[in-house]
Amino acid sequence: MELPYATNLDIGKLAGVFNNTSATYKFYWLLSILEACEEGKTEISKKELFARMLGHAWYTVNYFHVSFGSQDLIQRAIQDITATENIPVNIRKERLLQVLLNSQNPSTVNLLKHFDKNVPHWFLTPWISRNRGENDNSYKNNIYQQSQKFSNQVLYALFPDSITINPFWISYLQTNSRILKDYCYWNLSLFLQVRNPNVPNIPGKLIKPPLRNTLVKQRSGYWDIAINELDGIDCIFTNTRLTAGQYALDHFVPHAFVSHDLIWNLVPIDTTFNSIKSDKLPNMDLHFDGFYSLQKSAFEIISHHSPKSKLLEEYWYLFPSDNDSVYFEYQKLRDVIAPLIAIAANNGFNYMNNK
């Protein structure tokens, strides 16, 4: 992915900021700068930018449980601040920014300050090179001094508590903000995919979706039909009797992990239980057989009543065949579900209470 060209700017230096990355800091730092520039800010406090960094990563860490790597403090900072400040996962980013900026909790304040040790100055290394024999501390001081002169058309000037965007860059950043954000997220997704090789849809887990899908088609065009044909079904978790329209449609492997609504991962369950289950993982030994039986019965019913249903096509990827028939095999479905459950558990998702 290439950045927009500008005749009076060395775009190659901006493109080079992600060449050497061992943590997510630079990605979230640039995203935060772009967001502030969109709001018309050119002199921005570091504390605000650090808070914005956590805001951008909040949902990825707390909802999707994506791993940032053992050396990355953003993930640990978010987890600690979530507990310390008692902040809900679904807090709005604007509200989170207010909480972080106004917090007097020493732990929160120190966690935000920690990012000043590396992020603001090392980000500028494409513009300001290290002199021969220069140690880290001297190099850091040199970056501060040279940036304040806007040497080499550096992106911003660094001060103890703030940055000032170089006037030569302001128009470019504001005009191309959306493309530059896409560039950040593209590079961030590549960075995180390496650290989460078995986690599906990393790009879809970098931004909080505005709304979850309602699953209306899956309910009315699939499960309601199957449940009516079966004259009701039993919830695989509580054994409660369920009838059409009187159930919650649940993701067997949590949506927060798979981030899709494919029909082969959906199952009707008791509405009361669904409200407390949240994104907990089912126990394969206790719950898979019931899940498989309901899935197989529903598939056979819909195949008979609505053989052209688009929802049936979602099973073809699980049960590929050389003809038009799909063989709904127990072991194949288990071989798809079991690794997803295991990987999700390794990524921090908790199992249900098996009482």
Image (cartoon, rainbow, N blue to C red):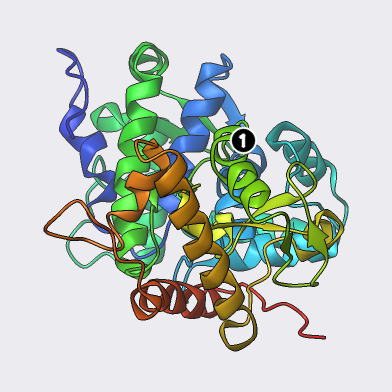
Residue 61 position within the rendered picture, expressed as x and y whole percent measured from the top left? 58, 59
Q: Is residue 241 visible?
A: yes
Image side of residue 87 versus residue 226, left or right: right
In the rendered image of this protein, does residue 1 appear above or below residue 269? above
Q: Residue at point 76% right, 41% down?
A: 245
Image side of residue 333 versus residue 251, left or right: left
Question: Which residue lies under the disc numbered 1?
Answer: 220
Q: Quadrant of the N terminus?
A: top left
Q: Residue at point 34% right, 17% down?
A: 176
Residue 3 position within the rendered picture, expressed as x and y whole percent measured from the top left? 21, 27
- Count every numbered label the image shows and give the total: 1
Name the residue type under label 1: Ser
Residue 211 position within the rendered picture, expressed as x and y whole percent measured from the top left? 63, 32
Q: Can residue 120 be seen in this view?
A: no
Residue 75 position within the rendered picture, expressed as x and y whole percent measured from the top left? 57, 64
Q: Nearer the viewer, residue 243 or 203?
A: 243
In the rendered image of this protein, does residue 174 appear above or below residue 63? above
In the rendered image of this protein, does residue 305 appear above or below residue 87? above
Q: In which quarter of the image is the C terminus?
A: bottom right
Badge 1 local density, few (<14 within 10 Å), some, or many (20+)? Answer: few
Image side of residue 296 versus residue 57, left or right: left
Q: Nearer the viewer, residue 285 or 155?
A: 285
| Circle 1 SS class | helix
Image side of residue 341 versus residue 175, left or right: right
Q: Residue at point 62% right, 40% down?
A: 219
In the rendered image of this protein, does residue 196 appear above or below residue 224? below
Q: Residue at point 81% right, 62% down?
A: 241
Q: Which of 308 and 210 is in front in this view?
A: 308
